[in-house]
Amino acid sequence: MLFSMESKTLSYHEKSILSDLTFNIKAGEKVAIIGASGSGKSTLLKALRQQQSVNSAWCPQQPGLVPVLSCHHNIYMGQLEQHSFFSNVRQLIFPSKQVKDTISDIAQSLEIRPQLKQASADLSGGQAQRCSIARAIYSQRRILLADEPLSALDFIQSQQVLHNLCQHFSTLVISLHNIELATKHCQRVIALKNGGILFDKSSQEISASDLALVY
């Protein structure tokens, strides 16, 4: 098991957010977490991240880019922890052809290649989200934990990006507001409501009545 919760209570600022959480997530699963704003999706994802911090790439709600650095440099930061200080400085100042080509290919797949030389402060909301996603992909980790990473994208862009993520990461746990995206691209959906799990089902088992209870 990559992730495991057993009768777990999760709190934020000493306030209980989610209680009696019991579930497991295996390697290779694609899991969507759904629920209304404030239902505890972010709290749950942060708790899962603590269990697999070394092996997980992380996409928070806010992209967390360094404003003065270019899109290219922000993407490169996905591998900062994997190289020495001097290697990182060299790559940030004089990136090798391999690094440039790899980052360029990732950016192209997310339709932000023209923005690679732009400072992240000048990116639109959707471009910033895709830069954050590119950083996660470049990290080359096997697990992705993502908190509403598609909120600034339209439906078509969201479908393309989510398909891309499912190809790059063997295991994916992502919070989403769009039910269609969740059920189409993820094998399993965990719905949160009223401080706990409303349901935990395979995408094929979810009915319209189930979804009507979520929001």
Image (cartoon, rainbow, N blue to C red):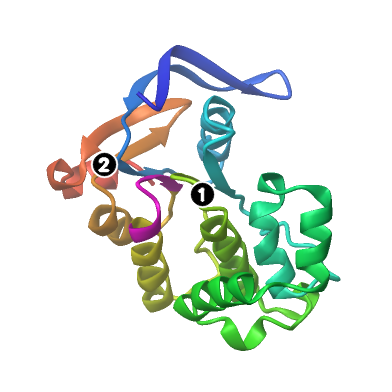
Image position of 144 (left or right of 125)? left
Residue 187 image offset from top left, x and y in percent: 23, 46
Amino acid bearing label 1: Ala
Disc 2 and disc 1 in contact, CB within 8 angstroms: no
Of the pair 198 and 132, the residue shown nearer to us: 132
Answer above or below: position of 36 versus 185: above
SS of the residue under disc 2: strand
Query: Quick check: 160 left or right of 96?
Result: left
Magenta-colored stretch includes residue 135? no
User: Pointer 2: what residue?
Assistant: 188
Q: Which residues are magenta?
A: 167-174
- x%, y% of residue 209? 19, 44
The residue positioned 38% from the left and 66% from the top of the image is 164
Name which of mark 2 and mark 1 comes first in the sequence: 1
Q: Residue at x 79, y 78 (%)?
A: 119
Relative to 50, is 125 above or below? below
Few, some or many residues within 10 Å of mark 1 (<14, 14–19, 20+): many
What is the x, y in percent for residue 79? 65, 53
Residue drawn at the location 42% of the way across and 18% of the way down: 5
Instruction: Report helix, strand or loop for mark 1.
Output: strand
Q: Which residue is mark 1?
A: 146
Tag 2: amino acid: Arg
* Residue 36 visible here: no
Q: Is residue 37 left or right of residue 174?
A: right
Residue nearest the viewer, comparing 77 with 89: 89
Q: Does residue 173 belong to the magenta stretch?
A: yes
